[in-house]
Amino acid sequence: MPRRFLEIHDMTRQEAHGVVNRAIEMKQSRFRSELLAGRTLALIFEKASTRTRVSFEMAVRHLGGSTIYMTQNDSQLGRSEPVEDTIRVLSRYVDGVVMRTFEHSKLTRMWAKTSIPIVNALSDDFHPCQVMGDVMTMVERGADLAKTKVAWVGDGNNMAHSWINAATYFPFELVLACPEGYTPNKDILDAGIKAGGKIRLVTDPLEAIRGAHFVNTDVWASMGQESEAGERMGVFQNYQVDAKAMALAAPGAKFMHCLPAHQGEEVTTEVFESEASIVWDQAENRLHIQKAILEWVYSGGEGTLPYTLAEI
């Protein structure tokens, strides 16, 4: 059975820690290999992207493979071909799929019919590669995760869900500040707390930021929510991360954002362009964490992994 990475919990806790450590090693050594030599991955992007597309294309190339880029405009997906049919055809052509889509159910439906690995490059429910890269960025910055508080400020979206998943595997405290009606999926939140994550949900963004070592946010209206943008501007107006809010965070706290950012909305330019901002490190680390994830996917089993599964 091929491996999949649709959400962080598709790895074991030990594997997730090992992949983060491996990504840091890869970055430090400018790692290249022939792991994917002779293999081609299809990148299916129903949502436009800069960082995700380029970082995955380069990750595959650094591992010796090649890619085919597909959108709805140049495939039968744009003519409503069932994803089950698409994956059954692609399974006979390519060696894996990296998909950036809307409904997470498309990924799970494809997985039920696939004979090749599938990696979630973003769905409406989860953004696991981004958050794994963000955990890498915190560790790279020397954070002792057992003594680290992470604040999530804004929409309880796919990023919030993946942060909740990460909090069940990594020992940081996660406090999410979301307005009523825009909180994370209750089942995902409850499961995260039940699994032992140090997770709290509040409505006051300043409560979440107070004493936080990393302050994290995202756009107020994601791709596909353009029609809600005006309404969301009103709902989230008190959730902007500005200098006054950052002053409540722990000394030396860092600002994080998955990008692209709307400066002047969820974050002020003063904070975004400040020394506290580590958004460019986050963006760079997408390349390295995705190389480590692909290595995990294609290594075939725990016994063949080229690194120790040591916890962070």
Image (cartoon, helix red, strand yellow):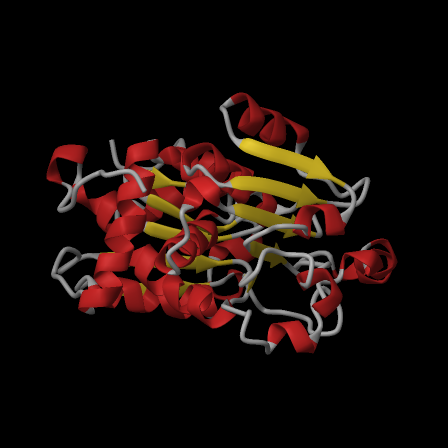
How far across and how far down the image is residue 135, in percent? 42, 51
Q: Is residue 227 visible?
A: yes
147 horizontally vs 274: left or right: left
Residue at 76 percent across and 43 percent down: it is 182
Q: Which quadrant does the C terminus fall into? A: top left
Residue at 15 percent across and 42 percent down: it is 305
Query: For residue 296, which quarter of the picture?
Result: top left
Residue at 77 percent across and 56 percent down: it is 239
Query: For residue 224, which quarter of the picture?
Result: bottom right
88 horizontally vs 48: left or right: left
In terms of depth relative to the viewer, which is nearer, 37 or 52?
52
How far across and how far down the image is residue 64, in percent? 17, 64
Q: Is residue 124 visible?
A: no
Q: Residue furthest top?
A: 194
In terms of depth relative to the viewer, which is nearer, 78 or 183?
183
How far across and how far down the image is residue 61, in percent? 23, 67
Residue at 29 percent across and 38 percent down: it is 311
Q: Which quadrant does the N terminus fall into? A: top left
Query: For residue 213, which quarter of the picture?
Result: bottom right
